[in-house]
């Protein structure tokens, strides 16, 4: 598909349900049979870490075909210094419009806004394939890790301001905004409000397992 005529604009309240449905379509069966991202988006908007200024959509002929959202998170160096950062996601594009540069456009627009709001760093936990072309690098390269000093392969970091991370060890503290998504019954109750969809296995679920359980380990570089 070429020459899609879409605009990128700020999300508003009237978009909420359509964005949740879009997330459900984009994430369905991707990481496991079904998905929780529509519920995640639903609860995120009421969480104090949610950043409404960075909620953006891609719209084509009045239809929302892409969406991105952000939350506040924190880096701490263990010596009393902290850095307020953002974590991006969910980012999604309707399956039939993927690979047309819409995800890229949503990210580039919102990175600029995040930067203008004073945020210097964005951290994500996700499939590197989706992010390295946008300038994300392995957390290992920036010395950003979880408590316990481990560097998940899926922990990805982008400097919105070059040099914001100065090489010292930073510990990443994500928001707890996604905790309610562990409640499978709550997710199922919310999902029942949408048209029925078939849960099934697909290879991306194995890919997700591999990415989400892998850790970077190159001690010779430390
Ligand atoms: C991931 C997603 C948001 C990307 O949006 P998109 O509009 O399809 O992506 P784009 O067309 O803007 O592509 C952006 C770039 O990433 C590359 N890319 C995107 N997905 C890729 C993949 N799975 N593997 C390899 N490269 C990929 C594209 O080639 C492109 O590279 P370029 O900038 O060098 O040209 C979209 O595919 C989607 O909604 N997927 C399902 C939900 C999901 O996985 N979201 C991300 C996790 S929060």
Image (cartoon, grey):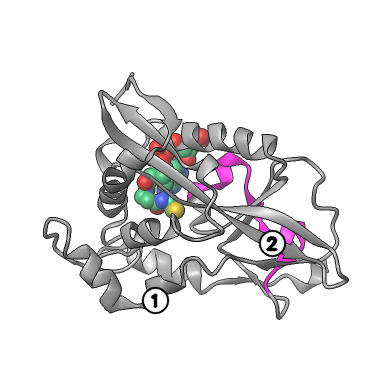
> For the view shown, which residue lies furthest in the bottom direction?
148
State which image quarter holds ligand 1: top left
Residue 30 belongs to magenta span: no
Helix or strand or loop: what does disc 2 sit on?
strand
- What residue sits 77% from the left and 62% below the top? 143
**Is 217 on the left or on the right of 179, as rendered?**
right
- What residue sits 32% from the left and 51% below the top? 23
**Is 138 on the left or on the right of 44, as rendered?**
right
Q: Quadrant of the C terminus?
A: bottom right
- Labels 1 and 2 touching (C-beta < 8 A): no
The image shows residue 165 at horizontal and vertical percentages of 80, 52
List the residue tagged with mark 1: 182
> For the view shown, which residue lies furthest in the right direction?
79
**C-alpha distance separating marks 1 and 2:** 22 Å
The image shows residue 145 at horizontal and vertical percentages of 70, 68
What stretch of residues is rendered in magenta? 130-146
Q: Is residue 53 visible?
A: yes
Task: Give the vertical position of 209 relative to 193 (above or below).
Answer: below
Q: Quick one: label 1 or label 2, which is nearer the N terminus? A: 2
């Amino acid at each position: 598909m070429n020459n899609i005529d879409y605009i990128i604009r700020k999300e508003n309240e009237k978009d909420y349900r359509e964005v949740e449905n879009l997330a459900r379509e984009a994430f369905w069966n991707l990481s496991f049979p079904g998905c929780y991202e529509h519920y995640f988006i639903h609860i995120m908007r009421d969480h104090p870490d949610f950043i409404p200024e960075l909620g953006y959509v891609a719209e084509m002929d009045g239809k929302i075909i892409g969406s991105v959202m952000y939350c506040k998170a924190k880096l701490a160096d263990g010596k009393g210094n902290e850095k307020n950062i953002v974590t991006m996601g969910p980012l999604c594009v309707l399956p039939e419009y993927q690979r047309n540069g819409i995800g890229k456009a949503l990210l580039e627009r919102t990175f600029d806004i995040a930067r203008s709001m004073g945020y210097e760093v964005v951290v994500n936990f996700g499939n590197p394939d989706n992010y390295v072309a946008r300038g994300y690098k392995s957390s290992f390269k920036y010395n950003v890790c979880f408590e316990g000093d481990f560097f998940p392969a899926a922990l990805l970091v982008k400097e919105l301001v070059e040099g914001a991370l100065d090489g010292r060890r930073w510990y990443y503290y994500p928001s707890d905004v996604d905790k309610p998504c562990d409640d499978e019954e709550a997710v199922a109750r919310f999902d029942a409000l949408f048209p029925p969809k078939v849960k099934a296995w697909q290879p991306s679920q194995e890919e997700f397992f591999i990415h989400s359980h892998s850790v970077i380990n190159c001690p010779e570089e430390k």
